Image (cartoon, helix red, strand yellow):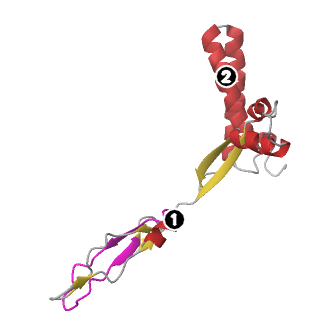
Amino acid sequence: MEATLRAGLGLLKPPSPTFVTLRCSSTLDLAFTTPGIRYEYRKPADTWSTDHFPLFLTPTSRRPQEDRTYAVISWPEFRARSKEIPPGQSFLDHVATCAREATTLVRVPASSPVPDLRLLNIRGNRRCQERIALNTSLPADWTAYRRIDAACRRHAGAARAGPGYAPAYREAATRAKPGAL
């Protein structure tokens, strides 16, 4: 039992007796599962003329939830950390330590699309410009915010439209005569 728990397996059901006779009761079957795959068990309603309670294992989801892990390094933070090498540490160890400390790990469900780094950068710039515009209330800052917001919406719309999205081609196709393209 300890070996299975050390291996990362979890006990699916409590070890209650599943084999019952007049003189003894015991647990014949134990079900173990990994944390990523979720199952549930149930006993059938009719166990007449049997001394063993069969268990039905059913997955709680249709397929196991898979996660992708992305590692994103903040390069400004990496540069700031790697300016000085502490005494007694080798250069490569210091670079590895700085990279590990500047890295953010993100877990994303496998069904979600791959993050678009350009869109993430545009969104970050939009948030920054929005804060500036809210703090200063200057028309020029609001104009800059609206321009970045429009670029963000255009890029997000292009990403939703699919990989073959070409705004100029679609615009030309809507204005052109049928059969011209």
> 76 above or below 42?
above
The circle drawn on residue 98 is: none
Q: Amino acid at mark 2?
A: Cys
Instruction: Name which residue lies at 70% across and 15% down.
Output: 143
Q: Which residue is mark 2?
A: 128
- At label 1, counting other C-alpha atoms closer than 10 Å, the crowd grade (few under 14, some 14-19, many 20 or more) is few
> Which of the 4 image quarters holds residue 150?
top right
Q: Give how far apart the Cα atoms at labels 2 and 1 are.
A: 38 Å
Q: Position of residue 23 (x, y in %)?
A: 16, 88
Asked if the magenta segment contains residue 161, the reply would be no
> 149 above or below 49?
above
Instruction: Report the magenta residues as a range.
Output: 35-58
Asked if the magenta segment contains residue 40, the reply would be yes
> 91 above or below 10?
above
Label 2 sits on a secondary structure element that is helix
Instruction: Name which residue lies at 75% across and 47% down.
Output: 165
Q: Is residue 18 left or right of residue 126?
A: left
Q: Decide whether the magenta segment is chiefly helix, strand or loop.
A: loop
Q: Which residue is mark 1?
A: 64
Label 1 sits on a secondary structure element that is loop
Residue 65 visible in the snapshot = yes
